[in-house]
Image (spheres, rainbow, N blue to C red):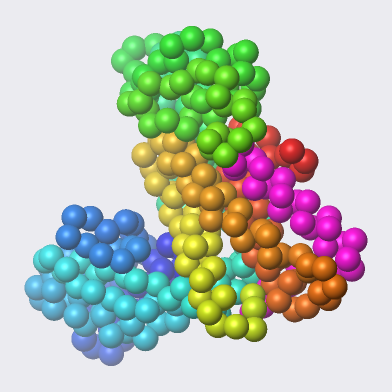
Amino acid sequence: MTPVELSRTVLHAVRCAVDEGQLSVVVPERVVVSEPGAGGCGEYATNVALQLARAAGKPPRTVAEILRPRLIAADGIEDVVVTGPGFLNFRLDRGVDALQDLVREIRAQGQRYGHGGALAGQVLALRVPYEVRAEAVADAVVRIVATQGGRATVEHGEPVDLRPVPAPEDPAPLGPDAARWALLHPAPHDRPRITADHLVQREGNPLFRVRYAHARVRSLGRGAARLGFAAEPGPLNTTEADTAAVTPALHTPLADYPRILTAAATHRAPDRLARHLVTVADAVLPFLTCVLPIGEEKPSAAHRARLALAEAAGTVLAGGLSLLGIDAPEHL
């Protein structure tokens, strides 16, 4: 379940409570779902109960407890915990069926997976200094904001409102892809490293891992075609133990991608997207060894399902790299 889907589920729960007479409020147009704050738990949280409490004439925790059973009954939600004055915290169902649904969703949306309307209609005016890192960050922010329905413009001069720590030297010798990664991967308050390490093709280089993971996925697709089969979502394996082992490792970062995009757009922080791509790559790389048949093994439904999952990860990697202005290679 994506944050957008979870937001719709919460709205549906509010509507049901209103229709059944347990709440007397105007149903809001949208509900904000975000990472849990201090004292929270699970993957997501919302303060909708606090927002509705005054109009409902009830304490926020009472409103939350009215909504909780409806939310627990919803598909894709494993548990809901009320914390603090009335925050609703969600733990999502990461089961086999949920993973298959997620893979289908990514395949259907392609590189638009994760796009939403969190900033719909908003125009962000970015003022940046004449400095190479600030320019690179602003360029990435413009693209990322657009994924959430907003529009960002870039101007120069004082006073600036986007000033990451400047690059210590010209990154151009690294080439366009490594240079952008060197400028975008660190948090804005961290000093970027403009070193040849970004060009080295080895595990210690995060950019290499991300691009290599994408290239490996594409290679597996070509290999599967030569063996006469294509990707198709379904059970990954006939044994529940193997499926349970891979589900959280890959499901969580793929399902979290829309939330990361929203956070990167809202906070003007392409570094959040860059670091998440590393998480996706590190999750998918160990899995790729079991995608194709080995030896005399014949292609099966499990192989088609594994290929579909791998390609879903490749789609996320390609989409994220594109938003950062970095090439996603077919071969590496």
For image coordinates 46% across by 21% down, the residue present is: 193
Q: Please name the predominant secondary structure of the magenta segment in the image.
A: helix
For image coordinates 75% across by 78% down, the residue present is: 301
* Residue 160 placement (x, y as % from top left): 34, 18
Left or right: residue 165 versus residue 182 is left
Q: In which quarter of the image is residue 284?
A: bottom right
The magenta stretch is 208-235
Q: Is residue 234 magenta?
A: yes
Residue 261 visible in the displayed image? no
> Which one is nearer the viewer's eye here, 2 or 18?
2
> Which one is nearer the viewer's eye here, 5 or 167?
167
* Residue 208 placement (x, y as % from top left): 61, 36
Residue 3 visible in the displayed image? yes
Rendered position, 211 above or below 177: below
Rendered position, 198 above or below 329: above
Rendered position, 2 above or below 76: above
Q: Which residue lies furthest to the bottom in this view?
A: 20
> Which one is nearer the viewer's eye here, 101 or 265?
101
In the picture, the quarter occupied by the C terminus is: top right
Rendered position, 154 above or below 167: below
